[in-house]
Amino acid sequence: MNITEKILAHASGSKQVYPDEIIETKIDLAMSHDGTTPPTVMTFNKIADKVWDPDKIVIVFDHNVPANNIGSAEFQKITRKFAKTQGIKKFFTHGEGICHQVLPEQGLIKPGEVIVGADSHTCTYGAFGAFATGMGATDLAMIYATGQTWFMVPRTIKINVQGALHGYTTPKDLILKIIGEIGSFGATYHALEFTGSVIENMDVPGRLTMCNMTVESGAKNGIMEPNKAVLDFLKVRNVSDFKVVRSDKDASYEKEYNFQVDDLEPQIACPDNVDNIHPLNQVEGVEINQAFLGSCTNGRLEDLRLAADVLKGHKVHDDVRFLVVPASKNIYLDALKEGIIETFLEAGAIVCNPGCGPCLGAHMGVLGSEEVCISSTNRNFVGRMGDPKSKVYLANPAVVASSAIAGEITGPDI
């Protein structure tokens, strides 16, 4: 079996599982946020009085923090009441950050576990060798009540990546390249298993970025076998009592892709689909009104550091709003200590509190009609960040920063 099949077999109490088989599995950790907890609670209240295990539930306020309208405020009231009534202690409401950054930071993610969340980018945690996937509020309500759910065992696509990333080319460019090759529906309900020397040597932030975006190809989950960087990350947070799961050498895959990245240049996802991928040199010169650095995809310290390196000594273009949103409070504090926040402010950027912010077009940085944004986020669908007539281009943090300076899409000098 491959890593995904082994994890699901263990969770279902089976010696072996097979692609397309329907199984019932036990859940190790379940998560919802301020946007998805209330609809989860609405269904939960119809079927149960107490959650199956309050210690295995995590709730994070991140989508609209602080509340930006009455609806958001009411959602957060419902969520606070639910958490208090159910004795849920892993409850993050004071701007700790985006759920997909907060959970790993807090040492809540373990290799080999089955993790679900009422958010499509829950697949991020596959970076740690866990089976992690998003689901709807109704399904999550059943898990909150029973601690179990069913899955169809996904078929697995193997992505082998060799070579080395150079210059200002990052894991964000690699995953964009892969999605461009596979297509936005090419991995629907499949597991994407990443292997090869590039993945083995990749740091934790890069792994999180790549697994985060696997859902943009339709994948059920993205997953990587834990490497030394992952094990060191867990050790620092005193995470123990886990088992590293690895694919058998004779594991079977539905399909395999091979990528050689030595010559890979920065990639851009052009409107209005994530698989509309072009190399930077084919997109340069597009005028922008806004640049956004942040999100659960690229709001980590390494991303802020890279952008600040590009921005240092420059000013944001007069016609551009450059919004910077650290993915967590801890990242914000580290960026303050390193002088990164000072660099952004001196350049004319607007630094906002940790959270999802402009990514979903609901809170801060909403785009107007015909406006263009270059963003480090994961989606560029019609109306994703505001008006349906606005346009969003996706890029790595260095390209976002250099474009904010130039007023048009461009890359930093290498």
Image (cartoon, rainbow, N blue to C red):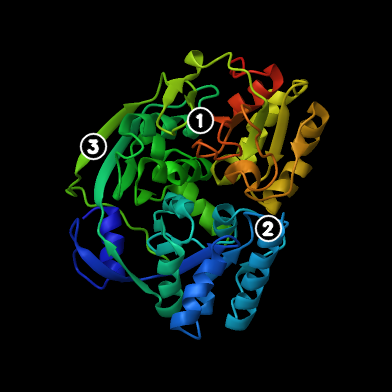
Q: Amino acid at mark 3?
A: Glu
Q: Position of residue 328 (x, y in %)?
A: 66, 51
Q: Please tell me whether residue 66 is drawn above or below residue 137 in the rendered image.
A: above
Residue 232 point in image, percent of width and height: 52, 52
Q: Residue at x 46, y 26 (%)?
A: 165
Q: Report the residue at 40% width, 56% height from top.
A: 133
The residue type indicated by label 2 comes to Glu
Question: In the rendering, at what x and y percent does residue 109 appear?
Answer: 49, 61
78 sits left or right of 141 in the view: right
Report the residue at 41% width, 57% height from top. 132
How crowded is the residue under tag 2: few (<14 C-alpha within 10 Å), some, or many (20+)? many
Figure label count:
3
Q: CA distance from mark 2 to mark 3?
A: 39 Å
Which label lies toward us, 2 or 1?
Answer: 2
In the rendered structure, which disc, 1 or 3, sits on the residue that comes first in sequence?
A: 1
Q: What label sits on residue 96 in the rendered view?
A: 2
Of pointers 2 and 1, the one earlier in the residue sequence: 2
Q: Mark 3 = which residue?
A: 256
Residue beneath disc 1: 170
**Residues at discs 1 and 3 in contact (Cβ within 8 Å):** no
Q: Is residue 239 visible?
A: no
Q: Does 213 sit above or below residue 284?
A: below
In this picture, residue 364 sits left or right of residue 269:
right
